[in-house]
Image: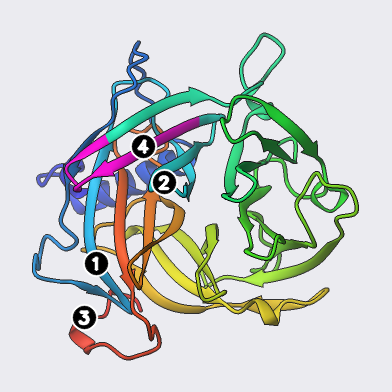
Amino acid sequence: MMNVLGSGMPQKLKRLALCILLAVLVVGGVRTVYPSYSQDITLRRLTLNPDDPAQRYVGALAFIAAWELHSRNEAFGGISALTALKNGRFVGIGDAGTLIGFGLSNGSRVTRPFIVPLPNAQGPDISYKDRDSEGIAYDPDSDQYWVSFEQRHAIRRYSGSLGRQTGIMRPREMQDWPNNKGAESIIRLKDGRFLVIAESVDDRMHPALLFSGAPVERGTSITSFKFRPPTGYRVTDGVQLPDGRIAILNRSIGFPRGFSAKISLLNLANISRDSTVSAKVIASLAAPLLVDNMEGIAVTREGHDTILWLVSDNNFSIFQRTILMKFRLPHQPDSKKPAASTAPGL
């Protein structure tokens, strides 16, 4: 950010300009629109820490690789959530009802990319409030997707081809959530239950819901609880790990450091009706480490290793990037790493 402002600017003006820039980023930044419907997505390798290219640990996470993703398609960007498919591919959901799919080949190129609107997301009677999608979950057994929406709060179910909507639910418990701070994260659990966490906060806590089964299905009951994020952070996405715990992605933006993120682990056993739960922070991303507006998290397996993937929402801003990051979660995430390997702020 400082490079954008110029090195010759007086300090007071720099601070003012930074405040204005951060405010612009929070409300969506400066959108750059290109008249293109290209389906191509390109990769560019990035370094975790430009000040220390040898750094390989961020708290309890082992850094593997990172890339900047780019496309000429005018709808590319704004990725609010990420899910991993059973065939090694990924699907991200943009916050304007856009699906962004891709695979990776040896970390050097994107395979079979697509950038398409969600079904029923476009049309003369459809407004942004109808397609403000924030979270995505996938069930590999039934080959179905669920997408959470804010503004007009809802959860919609889609076919495995993502070609048609197969159901919609507007839970009563979600309707009092603020219009622009609704269901930020939807997480499918291995036992068929679902977690939904709102972006809004009340007394530094997120309203959250535990569904006894799949949303849209008859007979599904809902348990309300609250989630307390790390101080100064808000939940942007989550995913269940193979061991049953929930990895939560928390994001913050502030002056003077800009964006930062924390990854925390939640024990499902702590959730009960009207309870307040929190999660243990295992890693932090803050300058000088690579970080942006981190909004999506997904999990895969490579042999016995659990792999966490993070993706950023560039807000369609010229000041931000779509960053994809890959980390390995050690078998014993509570084991201590050398102090020199700990991320700033952890």
Q: Which residue is mark 3?
A: 341
Whether pointer 4 and pointer 3 mark residues with C-beta atoms closer than 8 Å, the reply is: no
Q: Earlier in the sequence, mark 1 or mark 4?
A: 1
- Indicate the quadrant where residue 48 lies: bottom left
Q: Alpha-carbon neighbours of circle 1 within 10 Å: few (<14), some, or many (≥20)?
A: many
Look at the picture and state if 98 lies above or below 323: above
Q: Mark 1 against mark 4, which lies toward the viewer? A: 4
User: Disc 3 on helix, strand or loop?
Assistant: helix
Q: Earlier in the sequence, mark 2 or mark 3?
A: 2
Q: Which residue is mark 4?
A: 102
Residue 65 falls inside the magenta stretch: no
- Amino acid type, label 2: Asn
Relative depth, front residue between 75 and 219? 219
Q: Read off the residue under disc 2.
A: 87
- Which amino acid type is shown beneath numbered disc 4? Phe
Distance from disc 1 to disc 3, alpha carbons, whole Å, reads 11 Å
Q: Which residue is mark 1?
A: 63
Secondary structure at numbered mark 1? strand
> Of the residues under marks 4 and 3, which one precedes in the sequence?
4
Amino acid beneath label 1: Phe
The structure residue drawn at horizontal position 42% and vertical position 35%, both measured from the top left corner, is: 101
